Image (tube, grey):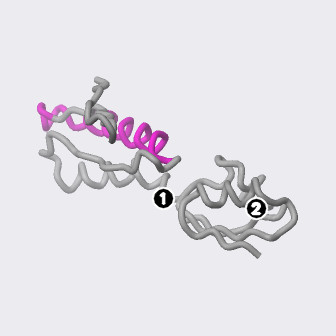
Amino acid sequence: MIFCTSSVVSAVAAKSATKTIPIVFANGSDPVKYGLVESLNRPGGNMTGVTFYNSGLGPKRIELLRQLVPSAAAIGLLVNPNNPNAEDDGDEITQAGRTSASASRSSTPAATARSTRCSPISGTAASTP
């Protein structure tokens, strides 16, 4: 039996290595999205596990933060660019920020949402309005 308890990367690697040895995973990713299992109800194959599904909580956290600090003009998000979830999570959270910023503009004119992607090697950034 193989246990994969870090990121989705180890579970994907284990799945590609064997189709017969049972694999148990525990991570914060959507296992269906990353092809680890066929569905949450019936995983199928040689993989099963637990997901904390942290990815779906990002937009809710932005909404809660906007309620707690409605005057916030900017909200920062730090992500590990090597994490397979980073891009999708960042996009979902940025969209949630845009939505909540639009809703709060009447009470907070300075509220804006934009995405800044930084390269960990060169340190340059590209902004998306």
In the picture shown, does residue 35 fall above or below 73?
A: below
Q: Residues within 10 Å of mark 2 (few under 14, many from 20)?
A: few
| Residue type at tag 2 | Asn
Q: Compare residues 29 and 69 and report the one nearer the observer.
A: 29
Q: In what quadrant of the picture does the C terminus appear? A: top left
Give the foreground label among 1 and 2: 1
SS at circle 1: helix
As drawn, is 127 to the left or to the right of 82?
Answer: left
Counting from the top left corner in percent of width and height, residue 86 is at: 45, 45
Q: Compare residues 44 and 12 and report the one nearer the observer.
A: 12
As drawn, is 108 to the left or to the right of 23?
Answer: left
User: So how many labels did they put on this image?
Assistant: 2
| Residue under numbered circle 2 | 41
Residue in the image at 63% along x and 68% along y = 4
In the picture shown, does residue 4 fall above or below 55?
A: below
Quadrant position of residue 92: top left
Q: Which residues are magenta?
A: 85-110
Residue pushed farthest right?
A: 20
Counting from the top left corner in percent of width and height, residue 9 is at: 59, 55
| Residue under numbered circle 1 | 54
